[in-house]
Image: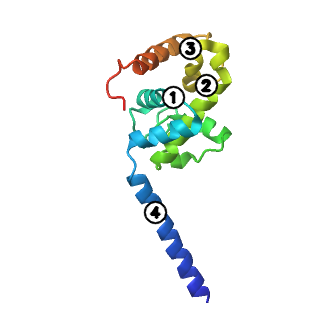
């Protein structure tokens, strides 16, 4: 009986992983971005631009500053939000979904207080946007982001 239960568990595990893999393979990156944007109520173009700027749509990357996945989510931020750090670089759908979640979070948190600069929060975090080189970094990020949203950045989905 134990063998039957174990075999059934192994079979179900294989089946679920196969179904999940097929589900993943059946969606294009563009479709995954659309799904995540809808789920988290963010603009699809904003999400696509963010992913283009952060990682050029590559999800298996870890930066020198310990940012992970397609949305380049920092390891510290991942811990704070209880994200699975290894999945950010191994599971494209998860990586896109967590980036959409963070975009939604920063948009909700700061959009009305900071006008168009709220998107900098995704890149620089919750500190002051005016101190030191953060202001310059924010301005450069905004230029790239808003150029992307108006169609001036090549390679956007």
Q: For numbered disc 1, what is the local secondary structure?
A: loop
- Would you identify the image quadrant in which residue 9 lies? bottom right
Query: For mark 2, does the 10 Å Cα neighbourhood hold few (<14), some (14 to 19), or many (20 or more) residues?
Result: many
The disc at residue 116 is 3
Q: Residue 71 location in percent, x, y? A: 49, 35
The residue beneath circle 1 is 43
Horizontal side, residue 44 vs residue 75: left or right: left
Q: CA distance from mark 4 to mark 2?
A: 34 Å
N-terminal-most mark, 4 or 2: 4
Residue at x-position 50% and y-position 65% = 16
Rendering quarter of residue 154: top left
Residue found 52% across the figure and 75% down from its top: 10
Q: Quadrant of the N terminus?
A: bottom right
Q: Residue at x 57, y 15 (%)?
A: 117
Q: Which residue is mark 4?
A: 19
Numbered tag placed on residue 145 in the rendering: none
Q: Secondary structure at mark 2?
A: helix
| Residue bearing the label numbered 2 | 107
| Disc 4, SS | helix
* Colouring rule applied to residues: rainbow
Sequence order check, earlier mark of 1 and 2 = 1
């Amino acid at each position: 009986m134990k063998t039957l239960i174990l075999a059934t568990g192994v079979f179900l595990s294989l089946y679920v992983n196969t179904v999940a893999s097929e589900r993943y393979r059946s969606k294009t990156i563009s479709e995954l971005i659309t799904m995540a944007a809808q789920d988290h109520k963010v603009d699809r173009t904003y999400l696509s631009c963010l992913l283009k700027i952060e990682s050029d749509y590559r999800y298996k990357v870890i930066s020198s500053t310990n940012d992970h996945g397609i949305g380049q989510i920092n390891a510290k931020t991942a811990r704070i939000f209880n994200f699975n750090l290894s999945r950010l670089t191994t599971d494209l759908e998860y990586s896109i979904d967590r980036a959409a979640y963070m975009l939604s979070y920063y948009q909700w948190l700061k959009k009305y207080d900071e006008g168009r600069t709220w998107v900098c929060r995704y890149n620089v975090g919750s500190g002051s946007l005016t101190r030191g080189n953060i202001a310059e970094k924010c301005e450069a990020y905004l230029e790239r982001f808003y150029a992307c949203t108006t169609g001036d950045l090549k390679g956007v989905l």
